[in-house]
Amino acid sequence: MAVVTVERKPLTFWERTYLPNIAAGLATTFKRMVKPTETLEYPEQRPEIPAGYRGVPTLVYDPNGREKCVSCQLCEFVCPPKAIRITPGEIPNEDPNAHVEKRPQEFKIDMLRCIYCGMCQEVCPEEAIWLQQQYSMTGYTREEMVNDKKRLYELGGTLPDEHFKWDKKKAAEQAAAHGGHH
Amino acid sequence: MFDFYFELPLLLRLLLQGTAVSLVLLPRAPPCSMAERKISAWIQGRPGPNRTKPPIAGFLAPLGLVASIPVLGTALQKLGIYQLAADGGKFTFKEDPIPGHVNKFYFVLAPIASMIPALTTVAFVPFGAYFDAAGKLVPVALTNLDVGLLAVFALGSLGVYSLILAGWASNSKYPFLGGVRASAQLISYELSMTLSVLPVFLWVNAPGGQGTLSLFDVVQTQSQPGFWGGTWYAMTMPVSAFIFLVALFAETNRQPFDMPESEADLVGGFHTEYGAFKWSLFFVAEYAHMIVGSGIFCLLFLGGWNPLPWVSFADLAHWLHFADKPLLMGLIAIGLFLAKVGFFIFFFMWVRWTLPRFRYDQVMKLGWQKLLPLSIANLIAYALVIAWIETR
């Protein structure tokens, strides 16, 4: 590769005094000073959270109001810091969602352990656990920092569902029971 | 009212005047510090302190009532005014530890010693002027000494002793280095500073006239009729003004010359071991130096209380018909003067957030190899020009 020697231009007298550069610097800082500030005044102004943000993990309902979690415990096993504890529970037969068979009796995420990696969301076969937009978790005690099932659903709310997998399964089973082919 | 005042015994009158000036100068430090924080914040694109709000209950209730005035209270809060009260309270009431390894007497003496020159120099600075009963322009000043500037220089350079004393008494490495740097820097820049104002006084002291170093007379020579009589010395002697300004930054230990403090390499410099009220005394002294230094710059080079070049204050008073009201005239003159000083306080802060701090060898090189020869050359050039004008 050819070496190109760049001629270093000698500084002029004015450049050597630094004064033009100091004046330019003063102009820059003055312009900066009269511009509006770059900062957000946090508690009153909140940052805009982009889509796909990995905030606090939450549990969600499907649009029909069914808890999507089936307590398969994959998230509990995959969780690197072991922040998730699930107590699985049966769904009683008289429940409209009895065909789903299981749901968590208790679901706890210790936010002092959680590292917001999103692996629980990635591994969940039911799309039931989502890292949503809440970025600020505070509490006065260690106990307060453990989100239980109730709190997780409060934070999560309802998310749209594309599949309605269990409803389809139930419909197919019913169709089969009525003598349709399966 | 004036007669009553002038009939008071001289000593009492001087005491009252001195107290009045100190009461204006001393509380200037907190607003200056808030201005410093606000301006640094704005230059860095953030809002700065704007949260502090006094409660309506408790001993801060009067302040709290002001804060609850709808628009004004919020505006003051946004400007961080209440933060001043919080800062002042903190400096006054927090624990003031004296480290075990220091020389206690000198350690306590240093902040006190820093206040003395800072508050004394203001005695020689005229702030304004008014027409007395005889129609003669007289200065508003504590003393209008004939050796005004010399006295300011003499007392102002005493300020460095407190820095050296603080550095020495702290008995640890970084404060000591800060004190040594302060003394070396002061010696280096005092020379250029003094040499840079000599052309002004060469011009003021025309041959045949009475010799003077009075700052009031310097302003008077900038407010004469005619083109050359009305120009400010910053225009006729820009190099002098520039050298004086640079040396002023060095003398007041402001960035880019804040070698004695230089928190990047000396922790906190000379005041590393100080805290609470003693530290705030150093702080107040620094701002008092800045105010007095800017005042002297305005008097020497920017026409003091003259509103514009070629528009002298006396003319303004005649045009706007307040020449016969001495109190109003004095207040307007002080207002004009303080506006200029205020601009320079802003300029100090503006430069602070524009220029990075020099390295110590660069400070020395700039002082001895650049500014000193430049100021000598400037003096010789102006001496020749003035000699040519006077003998023409």
Image: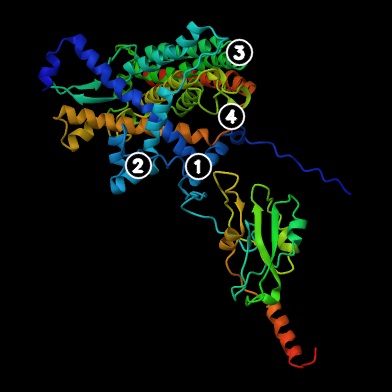
| Numbered badge on residue B193 | none
Q: Amino acid at mark 1?
A: Ile
Q: Position of residue A154 (x, y in %)?
A: 56, 62
Mark closer to the observer (1, 3): 3
Snapshot quadrant of residue A86: bottom right
Q: Are marks 2 and 3 in contact (CB under 8 Å)?
A: no
Q: Determine the secondary structure under disc 1.
A: helix
Q: Position of residue B327 (x, y in %)?
A: 17, 28
**Label 4: chain letter:** B
| Numbered badge on residue B76 | 2
**Label 2: chain letter:** B
Q: Amino acid at mark 3?
A: Ser
Q: Determine the secondary structure under disc 4.
A: loop
Q: Amino acid at mark 2?
A: Leu
| Pointer 4 residue | B357
Q: Position of residue A108 (x, y in %)?
A: 65, 55
Quadrant in which the C terminus of chain B is drawn: top left
Looking at the image, tell me whether mark 1 or mark 4 is earlier in sequence order.
1
Q: Amino acid at mark 4?
A: Arg
Q: Residues within 10 Å of mark 1 (few under 14, many from 20)?
A: many
| Pointer 3 residue | B172
Judge from the rendering whether residue A182 lies leftward or rightward of residue A103; answer left or right: right
Q: CA distance from mark 1 to mark 2?
A: 20 Å
| Pointer 1 residue | B43
**Which residue: 57% across, 44% down?**
A141
Mark closer to the observer (3, 4): 3
Residue A39 in the image: above or below residue A124: above
Looking at the image, tell me whether mark 3 or mark 4 is earlier in sequence order.
3
